[in-house]
Image (cartoon, rainbow, N blue to C red):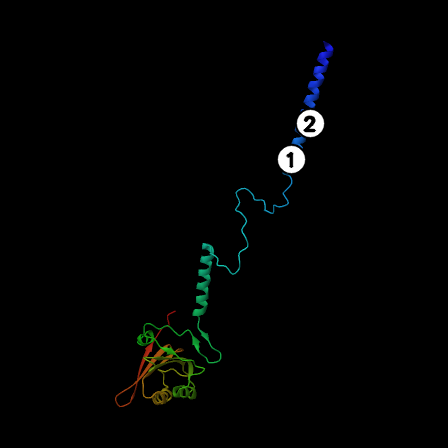
Amino acid sequence: MGSKAYCRNSWVVTISFLLLTSLMGSSCSNATNSDQLSPKSSATPQVEGSAPPTAHADPTSATTSSPQATARNKVMATTDKTTTDKTTTDKTTGAIDPLPYIPNTKLFPKLSRGCDRVDLATWQHPTKAVMIERGVEIRAVQLCDDRTYPVFYVNFKYDPQGQTQDYFLPLYAAMKSANGNYPFAFVSLSDQTIIYVTFGAEGEIQREFERFSETN
């Protein structure tokens, strides 16, 4: 009776040991396999909740700007415009850019209808020779009213409304002849004065002065 019980217990222990060994071997095998990456997989592990990695953008492809980038571009454009609005001078010809904006003047309607600006480097006309001969600094020239009404943006050596008529009256007369007896206007930049030069029925020179304040 004792011998039979002993044999039965031995078998139970043996079977239990085998089952335990089998279970431990299976767990080790699974752990080893889970630690190895498949050699065919090149995917980058992702953190839960993160966005999937994106491909490098083609530099030639179109991109969509973010709201922040759009706002920054507007600021840059405004800054560029501010820089451009400042008057610059061509070192070769003395031309200014941009021309003064003078809306509250009698001259403005002519200007607003469209005028052709001449290239001072290539412009050739008898009035140019008259002004250079008399020391007038030419900064720009526009031809208005179908190119029949010239507007000369200049700087004079003297005050056009001062006691200098012995200088200006001969200048106006020479300009009248050089311009074919057509009226014209001087925009004296340094004096902020527009001089409208017209001629009476007998050809006499008539002048009208108008002050302006440049508007930016």
Percent position of residue 129, x then y: 41, 88
Calculate the distance from the C-alpha at mark 2 to the C-alpha at mark 1.
16 Å
The kind of residue tagged 2 is: Thr
Would you identify the image quadrant in which residue 96 lies?
bottom left
Q: Amino acid at mark 1?
A: Ala
Q: How many marks?
A: 2
Tell me residue 93's x, y (percent).
46, 80
Q: Position of residue 31 (x, y in %)?
A: 65, 35
Q: Quadrant of the N terminus?
A: top right
Q: Residue at x 71, y 21 (%)?
A: 14
Q: Residue furthest right?
A: 3
Which label was assigned to residue 204? none
Mark 1: secondary structure: helix
Say above or below: 214 vs 54.
below
Nearer the camera: disc 2 or disc 1? 2
Residue name at image x 64 percent, y 37 percent: 33
Q: Closest to the observer: 102 or 19? A: 19
Is 72 rendered above or below residue 99?
Answer: above
Residue at which label 2 appears: 21
Report which residue position mark 1 lands on. Answer: 31
Quadrant of the drawing holding the C terminus: bottom left
SS state under label 2: helix
Residues 65 and 140: in front is 65
The residue closer to the viewer here, 138 or 144, is 144
